[in-house]
Amino acid sequence: MRGLSIAFPAQAGSAAPFVAVEGVNLDVADGEFVAIVGPTGCGKSTLLNATAGLLTPATGTVSIFGDPLAGLNRKAGYLFQAEALFPWKSALENVAIGLEVAGTKQGEAREKARRWLGRVGLSAFADRYPHMLSGGQRKRVGLAQVLIRDPKILLMDEPFGPLDAQTRQIMGNLLLDLWSADRKAVLFVTHDLEEAIALADRVVIMGAGPASRIIGEWRVSLARPRGMDVRLEPAFHQLHREIWAMLKDEVVKGYRQSEAVG
Ligand SMILES: Nc1ncnc2c1ncn2[C@@H]1O[C@H](COP(=O)(O)OP(=O)(O)OP(=O)(O)O)[C@@H](O)[C@H]1O
């Protein structure tokens, strides 16, 4: 992203467009895992949506492997907080559907989907419908549904947000296992600084909006593979303290902003 600004049309009571993010520069290397953290409403999802090609920049550019992005980003797979499973399809059918729509024969797509369900630990649940799975299991199906298409870039927006704290950690570790087997560039949006440090190579902090920008970034040099106990390491706590010293003021500003508008 180079000089990226995103504005939304003026709302009632305001003459000017609302500038959500302004002048954002961010490079993500091939195979790098970058987490974006910032206060509520600062524009994290907006940045991700611009990278997905769902929003057009007011100024600046998004380039994907060197080519300016025009239209939808077809190299990216997107995992949202909200679930995108079809309720009337089984876990297996949900994982296979993306390939089938793209033209893969049903038998081959389902064979691949079976392998992916195995990789996310759900071999025994292939025939279950989403309502017969736990929240964590549905997230696993969602991960397999995105990864089976082998996107070069993964865009993740609070993907484990609705899960309980322990399941979030387990899902984070599953994601790291899958990612380390086949490194993709990851942009992972979260408001949870611990989650960001535990997962990422680099943590990028956004300031409170409007016209939010990147105000800091830290390289996470904790060794990989990282297990659940990485959060207990002194180096983890040291980094958390450093980043939080900057983030906490922005979090307070962010809440004030959201109250002022709401
Ligand atoms: N379609 C839209 N029209 C107008 N304003 C919008 C639109 N989408 C987002 N915004 C505003 O842009 C700002 C950034 O929103 P965004 O959802 O990107 O923030 P966020 O950092 O992802 O927030 P959260 O952590 O609460 O999910 C907010 O002030 C939001 O109200």
Image: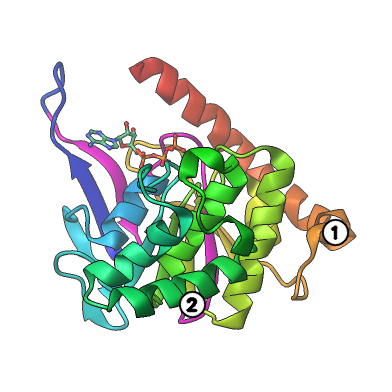
- Residue at left offset 45%, top offset 70%: 113
Visible residue check, residue 92: yes
**Mark 1 highlights which residue?**
229
Viewer-proximal residue, 155 or 242? 155
Q: How is the image coloured?
A: rainbow
Badge 1 amino acid: Asp
Visible residue check, residue 243: no
- Residue at left offset 75%, top offset 75%: 225
The magenta-colored residue range is 16-43
Viewer-proximal residue, 196 or 101? 101
* Quadrant of residue 27 within the rendered picture: bottom left
- Residue at left offset 42%, top offset 24%: 257
Badge 2 amino acid: Lys
Residue 148: percent from the left, percent from the top? 43, 72
**Mark 2 highlights which residue?**
184
Q: Earlier in the sequence, mark 2 or mark 1?
A: 2
Viewer-proximal residue, 169 or 49? 169
Helix, strand or loop at mark 1: helix
